[in-house]
Image (cartoon, rainbow, N blue to C red):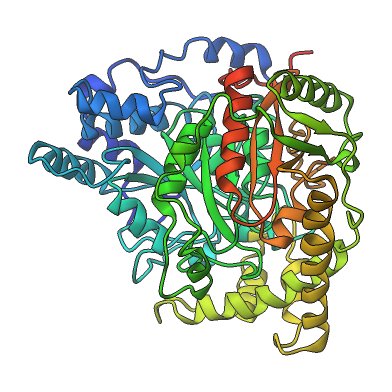
Amino acid sequence: MKKDGTDPGEMDRRRFLGLTIAASLVAGSSLRASQSVEDSAAERDEVSRLRPFELDEASISDLRRGLDEGRFSAAGLAGMYLARIEEIDGPETVIGLNAIIEINPDAMAIAAERDRERKSGRLRGALHGIPIVIKDNIDTSDRMRTSAGSLALAESIAAEDAFIVRRLREAGAVIIGKTNLSEWANFRSTHSSSGWSGRGGQTRNPYVLNRNPCGSSSGSGAAVAANLAAAAIGSETDGSIVCPATANGLVGIKPTLGLVSRSGIIPIAHSQDTAGPMARSVADAAAVLSAITGVDSTDSLTLNSKNRREADYTRFLDKDGLRGARLGVARKYFGFNQHVDQIMKQSIDVLKSLGATVIDPADMETTGKYDDSEFEVLLYEFKADINLYLGRLSSKITTRTLKALIRFNEENREREMPYFGQEIFLMAEEKGPLSTKAYRQALAKNRRLSAREGIDAVMTKHKLDALIAPTGGPAWPTDLVSGDHYTGGYSSASAVSGYPHITVPAGQAYELPVGISFFAGAWSEPRLIKFAYAFEQATKARKPPRFLPQVAL
């Protein structure tokens, strides 16, 4: 639902919760509305009054055990998370996190059905009764919209579930809502603010509220960090899972292209797009990844995963998983922030202490040599892919081409473009078909430089099991005037090659999380999960957010 309550057909969030959540779950007086972000002392006082949350930092295994033992019900869990959203997420609350763009009006009914199934002895899967949120570019055939954060699709209801949504439902998950995102997955403007959408407004970072949540899966990152759900689904073209994961103190998995179906997800570019899990632990991320993989007849690329996917990625959780591993340090991704460099130095010492052999440096010779061609490919594919997606929507939706979206934004400039424009849309609209020679040459260059002469080459040269790099720096202050201030970090080689990439919390700089990336060749998720888990268990680097109004220096 829209946070201002003007979205036609949507129940007001407070009325919906008041009707569906038991009074015992929402007992306690409401927090008064926040005044100004500038009023730091008042905000800090309000934050200190937040009621303890029973499910704070609860893992999926904790919730599953509670359900098995009868301490929780699926309806009770859904109700508690919805109450948490009510307390700290909306703009009228003291925190005003703004991570959830829409509550599932059927969440409590679905949770109650999961309870009835459990009572009758039927458990759907490993996520039975577990509350999950998903990014608002993933189709759901229910009463929730799928809009990519755009007012142009504010009334768009998908004809059928995305494949990964079907997989989540089959595993028993309760999808309690959709998360805000950078509008059109951050592919509208060169001056955008990550986490802002015309439909959802600006998402805030739960660690420091005036800081940015990063990446297009910003709402998914902020929501899970703030314990608004057990886990979330994000999507990535280049950095949009791993950047919000590192900025919000989470584990994020960007899978091998083809491990997770792309069907039913609003696209940027089919050669790089993939969905993936975002969670507070490696174990939780592995559990969600297990649920969403599978061969999809409507996405031919998933056929490649038939004999490569694992039924249960949690079996690779090994505290001793780094012993004997050979890891290369992608040193070219260092040096952009002294605090990050210090955290990485400490992390490398941990890796060595856990039995890993560290080759430093182990740089890809092609780093930075395909940035322009990557963007060129994304422009071509976005025009082709978004036109295909829009063309399949209900005839009630009038914006059925990229050209129509551009026109809609111009006609609704005050609401859609109050802070930044649509330069990328305009560049993409000028591109020709995917048969164009320039596109085909750029795509071939990208694949060669990122994969064969990039990740594959350096791993072969040094006989590596994986590479490591800093995922990103501490979150920057949100700036709606000038846009994002991204300073550095790793994502592109894995994104362009279609290879897997996992980020895990490594430390904090001034209470802002910093993550470490583990990445390798195609279908290497099992060993990356093993390495990330061993590092996570040795460091316990994740700390829950304190919702500070500004950085405490």
Q: Is residue 419 above or below residue 426?
A: above
Q: Residue 223 at x, y = what percent? A: 50, 36
Name the one closer to the observer, 75 or 66: 66
Q: Is residue 300 above or below residue 35?
A: below
| In the displayed structure image, the side of residue 494 where residue 370 appears, left or right | right
Place of residue 105 in the rendered image (x, y in percent of width and height, measured from the top left)? 29, 48
Q: Is residue 114 above or below residue 551?
A: below
**Quadrant location, the C terminus:** top right
Q: Where residue 131 sits: x, y (%)? A: 34, 38
Q: Nearer the viewer, residue 342 or 208?
A: 342
Mark yes or no: residue 384 visible: yes
Q: Quadrant of residue 189?
A: bottom right
Q: Is 214 rendered above or below residue 413? A: above
How many numbered dots are placed on residues in this image?
0
Camera-side residue of 200 and 314: 314
Residue at the location (63% across, 71% down)?
411
Residue located at (49% from left, 39% from top) = 285
Residue ranking furthest to the left: 120
Q: Is residue 427 visible?
A: no
Q: Residue at x 41, y 55 (%)?
A: 7
- Left or right of 381? Residue 264 is left
> Image check: 83 left or right of 514?
left
Q: Position of residue 147 (x, y in %)?
A: 49, 61
Q: Is residue 509 left or right of residue 108?
A: right
Q: Quadrant of residue 523?
A: bottom right
